[in-house]
Image: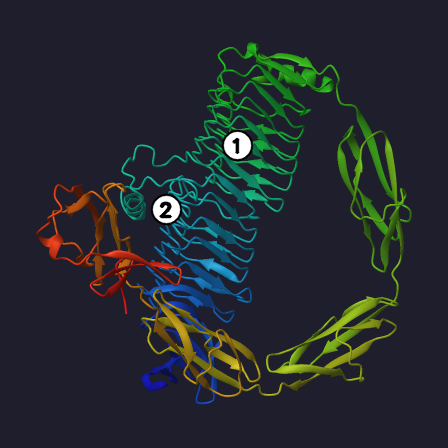
């Protein structure tokens, strides 16, 4: 039965909002009757939890948008399904839910925030998929989920908070989405098996130091880093700022900026880094102290290398600075002790102080810059600059010989110097448009030429037939390109409109005559498209532009869909569980099913139906109760083993397995010339009756008959003999018949 009571009436800024508490299908909600939303709040939860998109009270529908703070904290739930309507999972919502092994978030969520410690210490959780609608993950959200080995973060995520995935000891790889723009402190703190990183973030903001780097180990003496160390059993703080586990980091095709301190102190087996052409800037200290980094390939799109970006990469042996880089910042490659060869691109103008400080093994520098880059004496710390072979372009030779610092080196020009050619770009009719650039360029250099039309004209094509604008050309000789322009075609305006309360129409704008334009109508919730004002019912629709036009989309209200509540339950929760409950549209077919606990079995539903699962058609609110029964208990059996000490001396009844408490006769029959002496346990009864209370193993013992005048128990006892009846062997004694296993035959 539903329970309702008014729990809170708030007056805020002169307006009032009514809140109510409601229990529906076993889940507690706080209902906001003003904006028609529902928040899941604390209750007695266990097992599988399915949170619906909406709930109904007093014929009013409430959209379920939040899971409140600590709603499921410390509960024995095993799984949870979160609907597409959810916008917020509150602080500590599933904190310490150690039985939670499955979290399913609907693909349809549009802007979901996972708050601080929401899934903290969910130690049974093995994997988590966060769809594109998850936009923020706050601090410690999944911290210390000790079984969490697989994480999928989707594009749409913009922020990951402090220690969000801290101390995940089974996590081996992670991909950071393109849309991430900022991250908190030590997001993947102490993930000591995180060997593979794919970094796709287009332009994530810089980190402020090695302690805040997402993949390193913080050296703070207290706070969360110490807590996680204690959890993971780490007490050695000597290397707490060094990442010894990451072996590869890959940068995606959309990355434009590598944040400062991103890979600081990766001291393990990270040996190779490729910076793709799309990367424009590398932040300060980005790869600082990557001790075993042997090879770095810098992309052609790079324009700036940050301060100390590759400082103390002591295994790096050579580096090529791309042509688009104009300056190398302070200490960028300082303390790269193995560095022996440097190639400088043609646009380098300045090299910062100590850029190659302590790189004492440099023997070769190739510089393609025609003008010697400005440097200070602290750039190189080689004791004798004459030990460095400096190769320059022939036309730049005299300039280097006269330049400060450079002139101290052993200078020569390249044996195969780059040839220079002229590029001429002009307009076929300057009254229609202009072009750029013109100048001298190196052989094989790629140059972007562009044409800018004047008012009333448009670019048509280049003299080489290309219609690209701007157009990339490769210098392979003296080149001339002419841009051709044409008058603009007549343009008309298409206007797409709709009643904003019902929906929107898209596709309007200014178009050339003859253009094919697509118009579309998108209905608001509760409405559907019917037609355009001109009677056209296509959606989307194609329009050929021939004149100005107005196209109005028309909508109608949706029919009200009746929804009903289906409740499933067990008549005895200790024996089993029933599933399938929820709120469904009328006419929906739903499978309800019962799952028995160990030692029990399903018998029937309360209405006598024995189908499991059973299909029901939703037509009204309904309840289905599952009945269970205890499984049959097998009787306890004990083994009776009876034998003769020697077949030559006599035979005995046979043994068998009997239920506990059974009365069984055993008998020993001596062979000719022998007589029964006793059983192996000393008992002299023959025949003998035994009550089965455990396993019995007895051997009949015989002695040689010494006289025909026998006395004692064996004399008074009537003789037993075998008989054959209906093809079966029996034992007969004192007028009673027994089977060979000792059971009396009535």
| Residue 193 at x, y percent in the picture | 42, 40
Q: In this view, does 318 lie to the left or right of 513?
A: left
60 in relation to 237, above or below: below
Total of numbered circles in the picture?
2
- Looking at this view, is 252 or 608 the one in front? 608
Q: Which mark is residue 167?
A: 2
Residue at x 78% of width, y 46% of height: 470
- Give SS at disc 2: loop
Quarter in which the C terminus is drawn: bottom left
| Residue 538 at x, y percent in the picture | 78, 77
Quarter in which the N terminus is drawn: bottom left
Residue furthest front in the image: 708
Q: How far apart are marks 1 and 2 (CA)?
A: 35 Å
Q: Residue 329 carries which label?
A: 1
- Looking at this view, is 340 or 246 the one in front? 246
Residue at x 34% of width, y 62% of height: 92
Marks 1 and 2, the one that precedes in the sequence: 2
Whether pointer 1 and pointer 2 mark residues with C-beta atoms closer than 8 Å, the reply is: no
| Residue 77 at x, y percent in the picture | 36, 65
605 in relation to 147, above or below: below
Residue 679 visible in the picture: no
Q: Nearer the viewer, mark 1 or mark 2?
A: 2
Q: In this view, does 718 lie to the left or right of 294?
A: left
462 in relation to 292, above or below: below
């Amino acid at each position: 039965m539903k329970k309702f009571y008014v729990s809170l009436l708030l007056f805020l800024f002169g307006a009032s909002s009514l809140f109510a508490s409601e229990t529906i299908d076993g889940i507690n909600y706080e209902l906001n009757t003003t904006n028609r939303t529902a928040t899941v709040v604390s209750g007695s939860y266990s097992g599988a939890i399915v949170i619906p998109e909406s709930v109904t009270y007093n014929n009013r529908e409430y959209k379920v948008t939040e899971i409140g703070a600590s709603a499921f904290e410390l509960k024995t739930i095993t799984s949870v399904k979160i609907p597409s309507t959810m916008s917020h999972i509150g602080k500590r919502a599933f904190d310490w839910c150690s039985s939670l092994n499955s979290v399913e978030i609907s693909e349809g969520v549009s802007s979901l925030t996972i708050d601080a410690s929401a899934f903290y210490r969910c130690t049974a959780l093995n994997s988590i998929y966060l769809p594109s609608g998850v936009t923020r993950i706050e601090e410690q959200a999944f911290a210390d989920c000790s079984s969490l080995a697989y994480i999928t973060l989707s594009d749409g995520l913009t922020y990951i908070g402090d220690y969000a995935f801290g101390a995940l000891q089974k996590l081996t790889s992670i991909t950071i989405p393109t849309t991430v723009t900022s991250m908190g402190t030590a997001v993947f703190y102490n993930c000591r098996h995180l060997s593979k990183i794919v970094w796709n973030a287009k332009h994530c903001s810089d980190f402020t130091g090695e302690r805040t780097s997402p993949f390193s180990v913080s050296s703070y003496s207290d706070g969360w880093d110490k807590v996680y160390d204690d959890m993971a059993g780490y007490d050695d703080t000597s290397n707490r700022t060094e990442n010894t586990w990451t072996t590869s980091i890959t940068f995606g095709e959309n990355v434009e900026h590598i944040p400062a301190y991103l890979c600081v102190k990766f001291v393990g087996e990270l040996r190779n880094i490729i910076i793709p052409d799309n990367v424009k800037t590398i932040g300060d200290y980005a790869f600082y102290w990557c001790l075993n980094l042997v090879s770095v390939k810098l992309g052609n799109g790079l324009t700036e290398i940050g301060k100390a970006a590759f400082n103390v990469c002591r295994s790096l042996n050579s580096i090529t600075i791309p042509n688009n880089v104009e300056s190398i910042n302070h200490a960028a490659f300082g303390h790269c002790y193995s560095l022996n060869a440097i190639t400088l691109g043609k646009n380098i103008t300045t090299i910062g102080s100590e850029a190659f400080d302590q790189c004492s093994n440099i023997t070769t520098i190739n510089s393609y810059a025609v003008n010697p880059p400005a440097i200070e004496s602290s750039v190189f710390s080689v004791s004798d600059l004459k030990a460095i072979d400096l190769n320059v372009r022939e036309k730049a030779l005299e300039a280097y010989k006269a330049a400060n610092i450079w002139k101290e080196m052993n200078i020569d020009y390249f044996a195969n110097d780059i040839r220079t050619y002229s590029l001429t770009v002009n307009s076929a009719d300057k009254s229609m448009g202009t072009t750029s650039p013109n100048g001298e360029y190196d052989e094989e250099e790629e140059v972007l030429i562009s044409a800018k039309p004047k008012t009333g004209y448009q670019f048509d094509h280049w003299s080489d037939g290309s219609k690209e604008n701007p157009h990339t050309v490769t210098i392979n000789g003296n080149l001339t390109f002419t841009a051709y322009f044409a008058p603009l075609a007549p343009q008309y305006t298409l206007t797409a409109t709709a009643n904003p309360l019902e929906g929107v129409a898209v596709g309007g704008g200014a178009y050339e005559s003859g253009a094919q334009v697509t118009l579309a109508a998108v209905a608001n919730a509760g409405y559907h498209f019917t037609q355009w004002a001109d009677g056209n019912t296509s959606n989307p629709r194609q329009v050929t532009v021939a004149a100005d036009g107005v196209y109005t989309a028309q909508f109608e209200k949706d029919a009200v869909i009746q929804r009903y509540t289906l409740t499933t339950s067990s008549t005895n929760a200790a024996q089993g569980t029933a599933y399938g409950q929820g709120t469904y549209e009328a006419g929906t077919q739903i499978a309800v099913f019962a799952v028995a606990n160990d030692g029990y079995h399903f018998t029937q539903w309360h209405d006598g139906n024995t189908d499991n699962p059973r299909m029901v058609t939703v037509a009204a609110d309904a309840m289905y109760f599952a009945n269970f029964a205890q499984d049959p208990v097998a009787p306890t059996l004990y083994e009776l083993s009876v034998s003769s000490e020697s077949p030559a001396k006599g035979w005995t009844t046979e043994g068998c397995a009997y239920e506990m408490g059974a009365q069984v006769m055993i008998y020993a029959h001596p062979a000719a010339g022998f007589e029964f002496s006793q059983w192996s346990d000393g008992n002299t009864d023959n025949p003998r009756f035994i009550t089965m209370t455990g396993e019995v193993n007895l051997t009949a013992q015989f002695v040689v008959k010494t006289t025909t005048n026998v006395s004692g128990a064996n004399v008074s006892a009537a003789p037993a003999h075998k008989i054959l009846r209906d093809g079966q062997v029996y034992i007969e004694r004192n007028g009673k018949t027994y089977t060979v296993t000792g059971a009396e035959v009535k």
